[in-house]
Amino acid sequence: MQLTLDKFTKSFGDTEVIADMDLTVRDGEMLALLGPSGCGKSTTLFAIAGIHRVSGGRILFGDRDVSDLPSQKRNVGVVFQNYALYPHMSVAENIAFPLEVAGQDRATIKREVQAIAELVHIEKLLNRKPAELSGGQQQRVALARAIVRKPAVLLLDEPLANLDAKLRLEMRSEIRRIQQETGITAILVTHDQVEAMSMCDRVAIMNEGEILQIDSPTEMYRAPVSRFVAGFLGNPPITFVEGVTDGRGDVDLSGLKLPLPARLEALPAGRAVTLGIRPEHFGVARGLPVPGVVRFVEPQGRETLFDVALDNGAVLRSIQPVRQDLSVGDAVRFNLDTEAMLVFAETGARL
Amino acid sequence: MNMRALTDGAREGTAIAVPSTPVPPAVTLPPRRRGKPRGKPRVSLLGLAMLAPSLLLLCAFFFAPAIFTGVFAFTNMSTSTGIGKGDWMVTPVLLRQLRDAGLSEADEQAISAATYVVDAEHVARAEAGGVDARFLSDIESRLAGETYDNARDFERDLRDLPSKPRSARALKGAADHFASSVLNRRYATEAAFAAALSTVAPGLAPETLSLVTERAYTGAVFTVENFVTLATRRDTLRIVGNTFLYVGLTLGFNVAIGLFLALSTFYLPKRVGSVFSALWLLPRITPVVLYATLWQWFTWENGFIYILADTLGLPTYNYMKAGVTSAWTIMILSNGFVGASFGMILFSGALRAIPVQQLWASEVDGASRLQQIRRIILPQLRWPVLFVTAYQTLSLLSSYELIWLTTDGGPGTTTTVWALDAFKTALWAYSGEFKYGLGAAMALILVVVGLTLSIAYLILFKFDDLVSRPKIEF
């Protein structure tokens, strides 16, 4: 079911947290709300769930306006960060709870619980209490409880934050698999760009109550609308260097000149710009050779990360397939793919 | 007190449930030396020393009174027996009782008969009694060694003496000093009493003698009479019924109101909620006498309710003391209000421990507020509800002071509960006759009921599940 936020506004007391947000999540799509803590992503999620009241605007499930409906009547499934399982109920009872309060008969409940348990691979744990489960198992139970009622929207609030690294990888693909198998429209709230990019069809980047960009993960990575978005995506992160255009197609980085990408050669002189250079675009096979000194080497197994100090003192990061011929203090000339550089105006917008 | 003893026991129980299994030494390896054998509790003298004060206090203020109560319950101790060692004495009242119990008339007359003996002992007694010395020396010289078995013969002989007193009354008074009767005389030992009895009534059969001796003892004796009395007394059933009704209703009121208050303050805005709960604390923090007085002002003649009823044209009377239904209502309410805040505080704490996400989750799952309370919140309040129920049952069973200060168990004995009756029997009898033994028996029954109830509660609510395993293994 398609979900639409239309001029959605939320304030707590006098503080307006979110103003006039528009967002559309397509039917069957999984969308990530990505942003730093305090950016309003969880608030948006809880407003969609009906846990928070809407201060202004509308929330539509399909064509149905649910803005004034209590959460009981919205038919949403929510997976909370701490799972919020009912500790006094067994796994089966937890999953059955939404069906029971909906007044379904015993046989249906039993059948549905069994089916969902098989879908999320917890059919052997049905008689356990939540306290007897591991974090990943609890996560699966919470997911089962959220989707057993076949909700219009599945809302996931930082579902992986409480898991250890290995489980997180496993659950990432599990959640995506279950979402795709059920075809439920889903929203994932996270502050982890890897989660957002790996699990979702589209990512909405939020900051300070505003959606900055909605795009597919690849597109967003390739063409971020602003410096903030560019800085949020990518691991290891992008490096920014400040400079001024000289009007002849170069950027003066005080002591070092780098050419602008071809499409921006026409920029007038004297404009302060920020160049964004991703590590994979420095140290490539072809490009502009830039001299520098290795300051730091970080082996990452398959790749090696180098911090290279340029002549003017700026430090660029380079990620390359493992090589052991370089060590700290070595002078190098790495090629820079200037065409792949991102250029941002003083306002932060990408040029 | 009972609760504490039980929880301590349970804690030991869990410790036992997790035994540390000693590792069998490998056969092929030489036995390794271990610093300390595992699985044995280490007892440190310092620990015992630190515990000593509380152990002493526990012994002095819990075990000793409990043991005394248990012992006294099996005696007929009362104001008339005293708490010390008794004497042996036959009184006319006792004789009447013995007659009722089947003592023959001849035996009764034999026991009550007086003999007059002129010997050194009686002369000394007469001298101390202020009998004329000349008269006394006459008696001593002429009648020494004589024994009379009735007053008339002795007085006739006295009248024959030259120095007899002029008035007949003085003569009778002198004669009395020589009387030797077991009636109304205290004997410090059983042997002395039996000897005296055999002297005055030599014809008594041995079993009659031992019966009289036993019954003549004035001190407390061990007996199960108290329990027989309680079992056969007509009042017992009524008081037991009263107690059950009182505990049940007050407990229900406490828990229900406590839950209601906790839930409503939980859903109310914080500030309103705190004011609200603070108000409910007032009955608990008010001194009980003042609280009882407030209830009296509220319900007595010309009190609030009285005037209100008068204005509305309803019957007016002393609601606390004059009507059975109103007395009961006031007893339940006054006790219930004190206990409600206890439940409220415990339940509120337990409520706040439930993560808010669980409540959100239940709402999202479609549960109405009522379903949320019934299915999510109340099951998680099981332990505090058990605790309040158990604790309040025990404290209500043994509480009487507020009832004593308000309805005083009246009208009649309609609001008298077991504890109040025990207290009054043992320590507050209007007649001044305190039946310590009977009161202790009642208290002992109360303790037994309390213990049984607590054990039943613990089994019913699966106490093992509620006590989590120790975080640190010893």
Image (tube, rainbow, N blue to C red):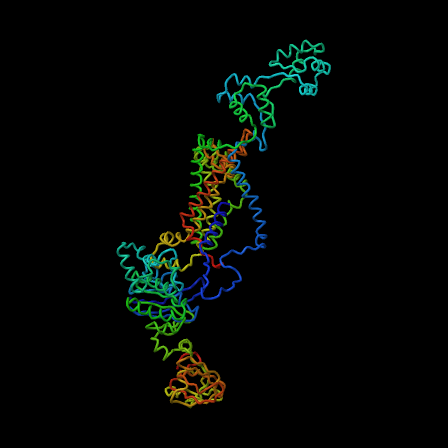
- Place residue B87 in its image quadrant: top right
The structure residue drawn at horizontal position 53% and vertical position 36%, both measured from the top left corner, is: B72
Rendered location of residue B51, percent (x, y) = 57, 51
> Which of B454/B360 is in front?
B454
Q: Is residue B332 above or below residue B104?
A: below
Q: Is residue B131 above or below residue A96?
A: above
Rendered location of residue B427, percent (x, y) = 54, 34
Please state the total of marks drawn on the protein image. Answer: 0
Rendered location of residue B337, percent (x, y) = 47, 44
Rendered location of residue B11, percent (x, y) = 48, 52
Q: Is residue A300 above or below residue A178?
A: below
Q: Tell me if residue B90 can be seen.
A: yes
- Place residue B254 in its image quadrant: top left
> Which of A48/A266 is in front?
A48
Q: Tell me if residue A24 can be seen.
A: no
**Residue furthest to the right:** B134
* Left or right for B141, reference B316: right
> Which of B373/A170 is in front?
A170
- Place residue A120 in its image quadrant: bottom left
